[in-house]
Image (cartoon, rainbow, N blue to C red):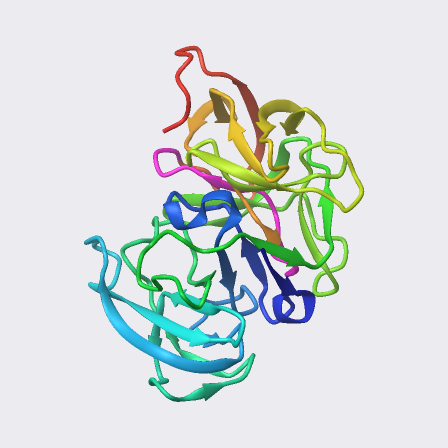
Amino acid sequence: MVTLPGDVLARYRRFSLYNSPYVAHDHGCAIDLYPGDGRERATDAPSPVAGEVLDTRAVRAPPKAYAAERDHLILVDTGEHVARMLHVEPAVSAGDRVEAGDSLGTLVRAGFFAPWVDNHIHLGFRPREANHYRAAGSVPIEVGATVEPLPWDGTGRVREVGGTYVVLDAPAHPAPGERFVGIDGGDGVVLDGGCPHYDGGGALVPPGSAAPETLTLAGSPVGRLGENGRDVRWDAIEVRANGTPITGISLFCARDGAFGAKLVCPDATFEEGEEVRVTIRADSTGSPPA
């Protein structure tokens, strides 16, 4: 396991280990780091690692109307591992030395992104002797920062409207910029992932704490913690906002003041300032989330 220090994470406004449908994030083996302050779409990609650039290459991305045709892979030898980063058009080349915080290049909105996903750097760590080009094979990442759990009762007003999502004004960050927060899943556990629209999610459990057997969101049970104490398998549930079925809730950790519940709802319309109540119930079909 690799620990990403708190001073590195503090360079980014948000992060997530599990909010992705891709195998590279299984078991928290990759982390997505979101630069910028949230007021406008970030473009620069500050490096989360220091070391020598081993290689950069263009990779094919799924075709999406809103996305670039190609993504990019950057490999950096940190001395202990090889850092594998995606979604950055590189301004560095093999043989260059980078320090944490140096610009790697420009963020790329790639076809790997769902339309509700913001620009970010994907980061994973491989053993130096491993194949660094395969999608899977990274080691688990541990977050070296305290994340404060915020209780949420499922209500809030729409603060931001996107084409496929809305962001509520609750739960509000109590001290923007000072520390990371996330939505509480019960007993101080912070939930991470796409609930339930991605296969599973994750939980950040405070050191020395015992996570509850059943995790909750907005007062309703949503899943159970796996044997490794990190992975979460969502229950077969349906999420509704003001009675309308929606795709799900995007869960992550953030330190910016724009934090609030992010509802993924490409097939529903909500207005800025509208009061919303989110309810979660067992899916009547009994089918697990896709």
Marks counted in the figure total 0
Is 60 displayed left or right of 106 in the figure? Answer: left
Q: Residue at x 60, y 40 (%)?
A: 230
Is 283 displayed left or right of 10 in the figure? Answer: left
The residue range painted magenta reads 254-268
Q: Is residue 148 above or below residue 35?
A: above
Residue 252 in the image, given as x and y percentages of width and height:
57, 48
Query: Which quarter of the figure is the C terminus placed in?
Result: top left
Work out whether residue 217 or residue 227 is closer to the camera in this orientation and state it. 227
Work out whether residue 4 or residue 34 is closer to the camera in this orientation and state it. 4
Work out whether residue 101 or residue 134 is closer to the camera in this orientation and state it. 134
Residue 191 in the image, given as x and y percentages of width and height:
61, 40
Residue 259 in magenta stretch:
yes
Residue 39 in the image, given as x and y percentages of width and height:
53, 66
Work out whether residue 262 or residue 206 is closer to the camera in this orientation and state it. 206
Residue 107 in magenta stretch:
no
The residue lying furthest to the bottom in this view is: 96
Is 37 displayed left or right of 97 in the figure? Answer: right
Answer yes or no: is residue 36 visible. yes
Our reading of the magenta stretch's main secondary structure is: loop
Answer yes or no: is residue 107 visible. no
